[in-house]
Amino acid sequence: MNYEAENAASSAAYIPGAKKKRSFWKNPKFKFGATATALTISFVALVIIINVIFSALATSYLWYIDMTKEKMYTISESTLMLLDPYRNNENVNIRIIFCQDPDKLEQSLETKLVHNMALQYEQEFDFVKVEYIDIVKHPSLADPYRTTSETNVKTTDVIIENGSDFRKFALEAFYTFSSNTGEVFALTPSIKSPRQSCSLSATGQSRTLQLAMASRSKDRKFTRCSKTPDLTCAR
Amino acid sequence: MLAIYKREMLSYFTSPIGYVFMGVFLAVSGFIFSLATLQQGVDSDVGTYFTIMLFVFVVVIPLLTMKSFSEERRSRTEQLLLTSPVSLFGMVFGKFLAAYTMFAITYIASCFNYIALYKFGNPNTGQLVGYSIAILLIGAAFVSVGIFISSLTENQIIAAIGTIAVILIFLLASFLNQYIDVYAIRAVLSWISVYSRFGNFTHGVFDFNAVLYYFSISGVFLFLTVRIYEKRRWE
């Protein structure tokens, strides 16, 4: 009896024209032909889109882990404390302007670190904005930052602007290096000491911002920054 | 999948390929490690070593992957694989996993080099772990590229040369940037470049964006290999 039932069922399965339900993945259309090609392209496109979105988010929100012993890619507590009072100050509107495209700033350790610090400031403080100008392609963009006709603006320079005031810094102003060998102390993880780290994160970066913020003052004498006694800011 | 994995692993040790791969990898990595760290007097910065190793992968990874599918096609055992009771994904992933196991075991064996670094220097363990994760992910990406290229041809030499070419494109895409003036194109090339993304790790940053990208390359090329075999099975 059971045999007959099985036989009937198997015969029914082979009735010509009988429609069998196939899952999408087992459908021949999925396995080859235009649909398969479209599906492959869609998959690759989806992966690219996910990567682009994640990339944009990671760049905006600085998703990374700082693996350096000295936490060179992290704003120090002292810097945060120093700049905290300026958060609600309407007169403070800092623009950190790099003179080349962002991808070129990622090419060397020195430019990368300074650029990264600027991005961290931008993310942490609403009054800081990071901008880029290509002075090779558009030399006229550097004109507002030439104080005299002889002033030379280089691609590695960093301009810090607050309102109508600005300061132009050479990249070397942000780190310590040996004048004899040119070896960078403050940015090289292998030879950087904790003291130098403190010097970079607590003073080097903050000094720049402090200079820009303090530059609203018309006083052009040498000024000693109040919270960082080791700094002398030329005005 | 497990049967294919075991068979592949066995094949690496019943032919000279496994021994040649491990021998060349360990000898070259040991030599470069010594050259880039101890002999340079650099006792803790291993960035140069890992960067050179990326280019060593261009040569050694095709050794592992060139025979995966090419050999099956040449020896006509591909039909057996295609009609065996294993899913295509299982077949492709089994082969990938075997090649990747060889790569990962050899890389982990090469980590004994670091003992010398700990004895004579002061390396940053966190950074070493970050580098290692990145190298293992890049290895996975390159192995999947090799597996894909191997599925396209029955000639092992062509598979090896093809893999070298594609890996070189992934590595060197950003090297064209210095000749390109358009930022958008440079950004795309930097985005594609494995070398450019690895730069963050050499600077002490564990970049989640790069991690996702390496996973994506592996996923896309394995998917494409499955699609190639899906098409071939039905043809």
Image: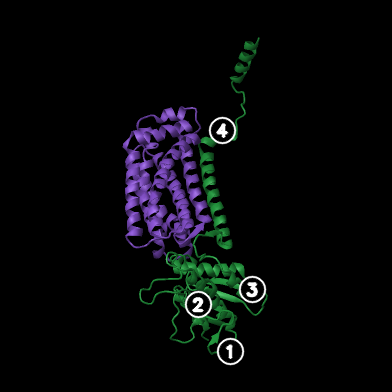
Chain colours: A green, B purple
The type of residue carrying mark 3 is Asp
Type of amino acid at the residue the image marks with label 2: Leu
Comparing marks 2 and 3, which lies closer to the viewer? 3
> Given contact means CB atoms under 8 Å apart, are the residues at marks 2 and 3 in contact?
no
Q: Secondary structure at mark 4?
A: loop
Q: Give the residue at the far top of this rendering.
A: A1
What label sits on residue A84 in the rendered view?
Answer: 3
Q: CA distance from mark 4 to mark 1?
A: 77 Å
Whether labels 1 and 2 belong to a single chain: the reply is yes
- Chain to which the residue tagged by mark 2 belongs: A
List the residue tagged with mark 4: A27
Q: Would residue A56 appear left or right of A189 to someone viewing this image? A: right
Residue B181, relative to residue B229: is it above or below? below
Q: Which residue is mark 1?
A: A218
Kind of residue at badge 1:
Lys
Q: Residue B235: tell me if it is visible.
A: no
Q: Nearer the viewer, residue A36 or A226?
A: A226
Q: Mark 1: give few (<14), some (14-19) or many (20+) Cα within 10 Å.
A: few
Mark 4 vs 1, N-terminal side: 4
What is the CA distance from the residue labelled 3 to the residue labelled 1? 24 Å
